[in-house]
Image (spheres, grey):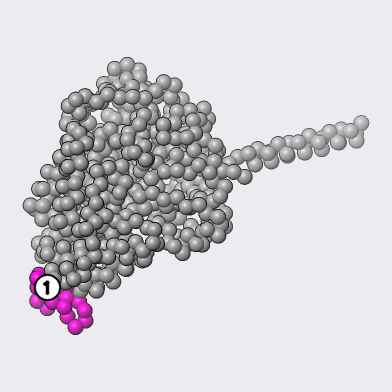
Amino acid sequence: MARTGRHVAVGAALCAALLLAGQARAETVLRISFFRDNPLLVSVDPFQVYYIEHRVELRNVAESLTDQDPVTGRVVPWLAKSWEISRDGLNYTFHLRDGVSFSNGAPFNAQAVKTAFDADKAFAISVPTVFGAIYLAGYDHADVLDDHTVKITLSQPNAGFLQATSTTHLAILAPESYTRTARERSLGAIIGTGPFILEHYTPEVGVKLVRRHGYGWPSRAATNPGEASVDAIELRYVPEGNVRNGQFLQGQVDILWPREPFSAADKQLLATKGARFHSRSLPGPAYNVYPNVKPGKVLADPVVRLALQKSIDRVSYARTIYDDTFPVVQSVYDVTTPFFKSEKEKLAYDPAGAAALLDKAGWARGSDGYRYKDGKRLTLVDNLFEKETAGILLVQDQLRQAGFDLKLIVLAPGEWMARTSAGRYDLVEGYLTRGDPIVLQNILDPRYARRGALANDAYAPETLAKAEKLFDAGLLATDDTERARAYAALQDLLIDEGVVFPLYERVWEAATLPKVQGFSWTSEGFALLNDIRVTP
């Protein structure tokens, strides 16, 4: 009997061990390595954030009334199954899906939508520069018509409003989220309807998402109709590119998702591990450089700005920094932006034309190759955010050949903000992402820009008046023909007046291990992570 009992005990222990091992094997964790966390804004609150990495995370936690088809750009149903827009563009009536709930168990209904929009409006009033404010432009109030019908009223037309309802910035959080402070939401106290729950956010370290059980209301753009295939997602912020690459090569991460596109050398290295590469031009402004044209600045002279535009070899930039297949920037906006207009001819490299313009402006070539006027070298100061890149060094060399002395000033985040706000620069880079051209107002319209000083510095007064008029025309238009006309004229103006110097198309790329299946882009360059499967 003792022997039999011992065998039973051993057998039971073995079964328990096997069961635990099976459970451990069954848990699937998707590991993603991102660029660094935002050093200027520690937040994962959808209405506040602008870092695209945060928005990838949020897209899988907090959902929106609508979505945007990544191929056509059309707005499609999500938490709202249908909608009507009044003829004057002031009233949007959304009919909501049944059976949707927040991860805390609260029902998703018209009152929850009203609570979210009203809370966002109050935040925008108290903090006018909050990133989500432009998305909510014109919002007046919301009326609950019944449990699953809400009417949103605008005080003025906002042609980008429907697209705004597809973004993470106007994602609908549970009413409980708005009982928390903005700081608490920034640190992760957000509750959404999505396929994942935000378990924790550790600034500068990463985010962990866990699968939500019972989920079943994805966007029409999704392929998986139900719960996510993976149990958890670990997203890490890793500033150094070499460290990220090493993690991928050692199998420590499943998806490598840097901010900058991969170089040809990177691709060759990562391909040794069977990497699959995914790329998409991000909608919104291209990677642009913006001038300071205030009186006394070198670039106050429009002739010098035009010469600068002609001195940049954008084809060489794309081929040298990336590869022969990399798209060459064509306009103020990337090609995936609605109402994009190619300005390719105006952006052509023309060193002879640049030389003639600089001669005309009185800048003579010196024996050292630089140009001089009244004994002063043609010098431009470029404020760089934390580091020099191979791309800006190439531009520096291109401008040197034209006679410009481009001084690169590498600054820590706080110092960069202080110098830029004080106008202590000639050139500064900037970009944002959104599937609507309105997003440029966050950079170049002083009335909406998060950094108003930069927006004011970029224009001569008469040009600013023209730009604001065109921004308003695009914002207030009631049909696509009017919007297309306004944004085409805006792109012409910004290039012709030297308000924007595009450098390259902002292509976002990710590399996945062979075991990762189902990766695809959303319209704004995110991914619906519940579509992803990880094979053994």
Residue behind mark 1: 359
Residue 160 visible in the shown view: yes
Compared across the picture, whether 167 is left or right of 88 comes to: right
Tell me the SS state at disc 1. Answer: helix
Looking at the rendered image, the quarter that the N terminus falls into is top right
Compared across the picture, whether 129 is left or right of 29 comes to: left
Answer above or below: position of 146 versus 325: above
Q: Which residue type does callout 1 highlight?
A: Asp
Task: Tell me where residue 480 appears, x and y as whole percent.
Answer: 21, 36
Q: Residue at the far bottom: name it.
A: 367
Give the residues in magenta: 360-380
Q: Which residue is drawn at 21% across and 67% down?
A: 350
Looking at the rendered image, the quarter that the C terminus falls into is top right
Task: Tell me where residue 150 appears, x and y as whole percent.
Answer: 30, 22
Between 171 and 481, the one nearer to me in the picture: 481
Q: Does the magenta stretch include residue 83?
A: no
